[in-house]
Amino acid sequence: MKKIAQIVWSELLPLSPVFTTREVAERAGVALSNASRDLAELEKNGMVVRVRRGLWAVVGHPDFSPYAVVPHLFAEQPSGYVSLLSALNLNGMMEQIARAVQIVTTAQRPTLQTRVGAYEFFQIAPKLFGGHRPYRRSGNFDIATPEKALFDTLYFSARKGRRFAALPEIEVPGGFARSEVEHWIERIDHQPLRTAVLERWADLARRVGAGT
């Protein structure tokens, strides 16, 4: 267990507060089963937390947040990026914090509940996937730009279920490019949906004076 603890603290934590059993096993030169057993012992001692099978975190690390887990949720599936209300909050556009980390991806996935947070996935057409960049203030994950986060929110508000039909107060940051929002709207293939999103965008832009 001491060897595994040394690997975690000296080799993995400088890279990320979230890591896999496989990463530990490979660096320690031990079998996955042995690494898993020793990590479970570290968890009993309150040194690490099991996020889900094969994934661990040091939640007391200054770089840890539930967002730091996001890159590790797509090891073997299409990637995703933080968007919607989560990204609007991180981008300083709204004060409300979503109860779950909201992630846009091209695959359909159920909500994931973990000991460090909940993760909610929203499936989008590949043509509309994009408009994100690295966020490095806390963890190394991808986040939608302010414009794309707003587009994603409007897009899902107009789809069946109208999940985000009633938005909280939005503040548009300096340099906000409304042309980027409209670029994404133009990429919506389904005409009725494109029209619905455009109407929501026009109404919101009037109310908040959204960019140029």
Image: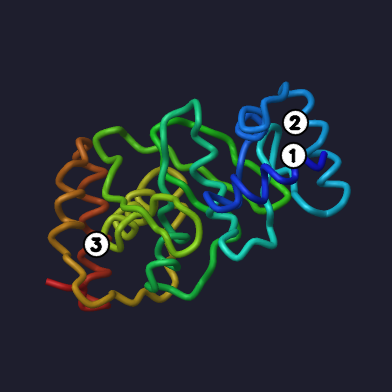
Does residue 58 sit above or below 191 in this rendering? below
Does residue 193 sit above or below 92 in this rendering? above
Name the amino acid, label 2.
Answer: Ala
Query: In terms of secondary structure, where does tag 1 sit?
Result: helix
Q: Residue at x 39, y 33 (%)?
A: 106
Residue underneath mark 2: 35
In depth, the one of 59 and 166 nearer the eye is: 59
Q: Which callout, 3 or 2, points at the residue further toward the start of the chain?
A: 2
Q: Position of residue 29 (x, y in %)?
A: 67, 26
Q: Which callout, 1 or 3, points at the residue further toward the start of the chain?
A: 1
Q: Residues within 10 Å of mark 1 (few under 14, many from 20)?
A: many
Query: In terms of secondary structure, where does tag 3 sit?
Result: helix
Name the amino acid, label 1.
Answer: Ile
Q: Residue at x 78, y 39 (%)?
A: 39
Q: Are marks 1 and 2 in contact (CB under 8 Å)?
A: yes
Q: Residues within 10 Å of mark 2 (few under 14, many from 20)?
A: many
